[in-house]
Image (cartoon, rainbow, N blue to C red):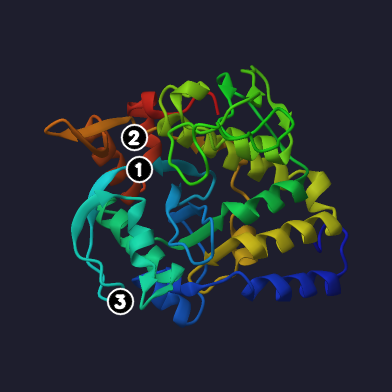
C-alpha cells in the first residue's frame, strides 16, 4: 500500500492495526509453534498451509470444518498447489486430553467440533489442533508452516469489500438455498423448522449457467455457488465438485485482491482488512499476515494449480461410513510428493488429477 500511493504513516498504521488482531499462534504445533515463540525466521519455501472453513450457526455451537484445504508452495515460491480433504473423509481421529476426545474412527469434519468442547465451553483453537493433528497423521505431512480458520459467516463481508469475483462456472448449478434474488427459499409446509428433511426448501431457485469465460458474480452469488453439493442441484459428484468450486473461488479471490483497482485503493483495502478481522484467524509462525503477503508477493496466481484427489463412499456391511480416496495409492503418493516438495514432477506424471477448468 505504501508503494501504491498511501503515505508511510498510513501504511504503518494499517500494519499495526491488522498485524495482531487476527493472529492466534496457538493454532500451530511442533517446530512452527516453537518458531512463533522465538525470534521470527525468514519466510521461505517450501511451505505448507492448512486452511479451514467453518460455518457455525451460533457462537456456542461446536464448529464443523466444512472445508479443509491445504496449500503447498514449492521452494522457489513461484506458485501454489491447492488441494482439499473431503469433509466426510473416514479417518483415525486422535485422542486429546484437553477435550477428552478418545481415539476413534470417524468423519474428519467432526474432529474440530469434538476437540473444541473443553470444560463446557467452545475452544476453537483446541478444536483446530485436533483437526490439524488428524490431517497430519493421515497425510504424513509433519507440520504446517501457517494456518487459518475462515468463518464463512463473516467471509461474505470480505467478498463484498472486493465487490464480487469473476470466475468460470464449470457446470449448470441450481441453488438449494436461495431464490434468484438472493433471498432464502421458503421451507416446504411438510418440513417445518423443527423437523429434519434432506431437501426442505421450495420455490424458484438461483441458477448458475455453465460458461466458457469468467463471469462476474455478486458476493452472495459467489458464496452460494461454492456452497452447493447436492446432485439434485446439478452437482453430480457432490462434495468433490464443491471442493473444486471452492478452490476455484479461492483462486478468483486472490486474483481479485491483486488487481490494481484493489491494491491501490486504501479505502477498499481497509474494508477488506476490517472484514478479515471479523472472519479470519491466522497463525504464521511468528510472522504477521501482512509479512506473509509480502513474502508471497511473487506467487503467480494465474499459475496456481488446483488439484482433485478422486474418491468415493466407504461402506461396511452396507452401512455408509464416509468417504475414502480411490485409488488410495494416488493420494498416498501425492502426499509423499508434498512432503518431498516434488509436486510439480508428480503432476507431470499424473496429469489427470489437475483441475484443467479452474
- Quadrant assignment, res 214: top right
Q: Secondary structure at mark 2?
A: helix
Secondary element under disc 1, as helix, strand or loop, is loop
Pointer 2 residue = 346
Label placed on residue 277:
none
Residue name at image x 50 percent, y 44 percent: 80
Marks 2 and 3, how far apart at CA: 39 Å
Instruction: State left or right for residue 126 relative to residue 227.
Output: left
Residue 299: percent from the left, percent from the top? Answer: 59, 47
Residue farthest front in this picture: 189
**Is the Cβ of the residue at disc 1 closer than 8 Å to that at disc 2?**
yes
The answer to whether 319 appears left or right of 136 in the picture is left
- Which label was assigned to residue 342? 1
Check the picture and name the quadrant holding the N terminus: bottom right
**Left or right of residue 49, residue 251 in this image:** right
Q: Is residue 143 visible?
A: no
Res. 202 image quadrant: top right
Q: Position of residue 244 (x, y in %)?
A: 48, 33
Mark 3 residue crowding within 10 angstroms, few (<14) / some (14–19) / many (20+): some
Can residue 286 be seen from the camera position used here? yes
Q: Nearer the viewer, mark 2 or mark 3?
A: 3
Image x and y of residue 335, in percent: 30, 44
- Label 2 crowding class (10 Å Cα cut-off): few <14, some 14-19, many 20+? some
Residue at x-position 44% and y-position 71%: 122
Please tell me which residue lies in front, 276 or 117: 117
For residue 22, above or below residue 298:
below
- Give the residue at x 68% y 35%: 221
Between the residue at mark 1 and the residue at mark 3, the CA separation in whole angstroms equals: 36 Å
Disc on res. 98: 3
Circle 3 — which element? loop
- In which quadrant is the C terminus drawn? top right
Going from N to C along the chain, the mark reached first, 2 or 3, is 3
Amino acid at each position: 500500500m505504501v508503494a501504491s500511493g498511501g503515505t508511510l504513516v498510513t501504511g504503518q498504521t494499517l500494519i499495526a492495526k491488522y498485524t495482531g488482531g487476527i493472529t492466534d499462534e496457538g493454532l500451530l504445533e511442533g517446530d512452527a509453534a516453537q518458531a512463533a515463540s522465538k525470534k521470527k525466521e525468514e519466510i521461505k519455501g517450501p511451505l505448507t498451509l492448512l486452511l479451514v472453513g467453518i460455518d457455525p450457526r451460533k457462537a456456542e455451537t461446536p464448529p464443523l470444518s466444512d472445508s479443509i484445504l491445504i496449500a503447498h508452495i514449492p521452494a522457489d515460491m513461484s506458485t501454489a498447489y491447492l488441494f482439499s480433504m473431503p469433509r466426510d473423509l473416514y479417518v483415525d481421529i486422535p485422542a486429546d486430553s484437553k477435550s477428552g476426545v478418545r481415539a476413534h474412527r470417524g468423519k474428519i469434519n467432526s474432529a474440530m467440533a469434538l476437540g473444541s468442547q473443553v470444560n463446557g465451553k467452545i475452544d476453537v483453537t483446541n478444536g483446530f489442533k485436533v483437526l490439524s493433528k488428524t490431517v497430519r497423521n493421515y497425510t504424513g505431512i509433519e507440520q504446517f508452516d501457517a494456518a487459518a480458520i475462515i468463518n464463512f459467516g463473516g467471509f461474505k463481508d470480505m467478498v463484498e469489500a472486493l465487490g464480487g469475483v469473476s470466475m468460470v462456472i464449470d457446470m449448470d448449478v441450481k441453488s438449494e438455498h436461495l431464490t434468484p434474488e438472493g433471498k432464502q427459499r421458503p421451507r416446504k409446509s411438510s418440513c417445518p423448522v423443527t423437523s429434519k428433511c434432506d431437501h426442505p426448501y421450495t420455490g424458484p431457485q438461483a441458477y448458475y449457467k455453465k460458461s466458457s469465460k469468467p463471469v462476474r458474480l455478486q458476493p452472495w452469488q459467489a458464496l452460494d455457488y461454492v456452497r452447493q453439493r447436492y446432485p439434485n442441484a446439478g452437482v453430480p459428484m457432490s462434495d468433490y465438485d464443491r471442493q473444486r468450486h471452492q478452490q476455484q473461488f479461492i483462486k478468483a479471490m486472490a486474483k481479485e485482491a491483486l488487481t490494481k483497482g484493489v491494491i491501490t485503493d486504501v479505502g477498499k483495502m481497509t474494508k477488506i482488512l476490517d472484514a478479515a478481522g471479523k472472519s479470519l484467524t491466522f497463525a504464521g509462525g511468528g510472522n504477521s499476515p501482512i509479512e506473509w503477503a509480502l513474502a508471497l508477493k511473487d506467487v503467480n496466481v494465474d499459475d496456481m494449480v488446483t488439484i482433485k484427489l478422486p474418491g468415493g463412499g466407504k461402506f461396511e456391511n452396507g452401512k455408509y461410513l464416509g468417504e475414502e480416496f480411490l485409488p488410495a495409492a494416488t493420494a498416498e503418493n501425492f502426499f509423499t510428493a508434498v512432503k518431498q516438495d516434488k509436486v510439480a514432477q508428480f503432476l507431470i506424471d499424473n496429469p489427470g488429477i489437475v483441475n484443467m477448468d479452474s
